[in-house]
Amino acid sequence: MDDTVGTADAPEGPFAECVLCREPTEYPETHKGVTLCPVCEWHEAQRTACSG
């Protein structure tokens, strides 16, 4: 049985900090641009979706 199934695409740390709450994100530290954690990404998407 192969123990590496599903882990090939998983990024390895260290992870960049969220620019809003300072929690770890899903992005590596080398990621360029604004990095948001999943929670802050969701809140930002909700905020911009309703600003119509």
Image: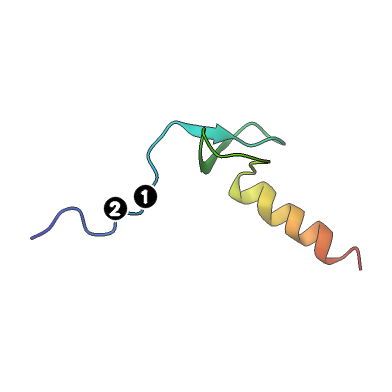
Residue at the spot 69% in from the left edge and 35% down from the top edge:
19
Mark 1, Cα crowd under 10 Å, few <14 / some 14-19 / many 20+, is few
Residue at the spot 77% in from the left edge and 61% down from the top edge:
46
Q: Quadrant of residue 35?
A: top right
Q: Which residue is mark 2?
A: 7
Per the image, label 2 sits on a secondary structure element best described as: loop
Q: Quadrant of residue 21?
A: top right
Please state the horizontal and vertical placement of residue 10, each as a whole percent of the image. Answer: 37, 50
In this rendering, position of residue 52 left or right of residue 15: right
Per the image, label 1 sits on a secondary structure element best described as: loop
Q: Quadrant of residue 34?
A: top right
Residue at the spot 28% in from the left edge and 59% down from the top edge:
6
Q: Quadrant of the N terminus?
A: bottom left
Residue at the spot 64% in from the left edge and 37% down from the top edge:
18
Q: CA distance from mark 1 to mark 2?
A: 5 Å
Mark 2, Cα crowd under 10 Å, few <14 / some 14-19 / many 20+, is few
Q: Quadrant of the C terminus?
A: bottom right
- Nearer-the-camera pick, 33 or 43: 33
Q: Is residue 23 above or below residue 42?
A: above
